[in-house]
Image (spheres, rainbow, N blue to C red):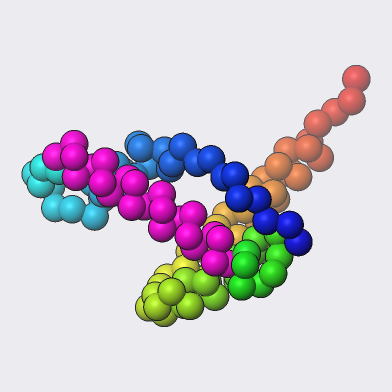
């Protein structure tokens, strides 16, 4: 597997990081713009490092949820395994529900 050394990353969407910060803090807590920028850069680096660790440790260019969980544990974040698996199950159930909804709508279509 060839690894690219010329990776250019603009970063995570700032509104996503801002929403995470706002949901984690009590109402009324002000976060300065400098702090928001520092958190944004840190979150971007963390995500990139997590993905890189996952791909390199599995010697693969195809990323799977199990690889992310293994990389998270390898970085010392074992406590995140349960919440990650729980969220993955929720997303899988939502996708199944969405797929079933789409299938039922497709079957209701009448060709003219």
Please tell me which residue lies in front, 108 or 52. Answer: 52
Q: Is residue 87 magenta?
A: no
Which percent across, then down, holds residue 53?
54, 66
Q: Is residue 52 magenta?
A: yes
Which percent across, then down, holds residue 8?
53, 40
**Residue found at the far right of this picture:** 112
State the extent of the magenta-drawn residues as a range.
32-54
Circle count: 0
In-image side of 77 versus 69 (left or right):
left
Q: Residue at x 40, y 78 (%)?
A: 76
Which percent across, then down, holds residue 44?
41, 49
Which percent across, then down, holds residue 106?
78, 37
In-image side of 112 versus 80 (left or right):
right
Quadrant location of the N terminus in the rendered image? bottom right
Using the rendered image of the protein, determine whether residue 89 is visible from the camera's viewpoint: no
Please tell me which residue lies in front, 10 or 5. Answer: 5
Q: Residue at x 62, y 67 (%)?
A: 56
């Amino acid at each position: 597997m060839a690894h690219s050394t010329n990776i250019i990353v603009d970063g995570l969407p700032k509104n996503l990081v801002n929403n995470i910060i706002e949901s984690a803090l009590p109402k009324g807590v002000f976060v300065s713009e400098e702090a928001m920028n520092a958190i944004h850069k840190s979150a971007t680096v963390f995500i990139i490092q997590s993905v890189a660790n996952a791909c390199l440790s599995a010697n693969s260019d195809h990323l799977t949820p199990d690889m992310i969980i293994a990389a998270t544990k390898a970085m010392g974040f074992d406590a995140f395994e349960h919440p990650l698996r729980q969220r993955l199950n929720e997303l899988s159930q939502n996708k199944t529900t969405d797929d079933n909804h789409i299938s039922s709508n497709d079957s209701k279509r009448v060709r003219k």
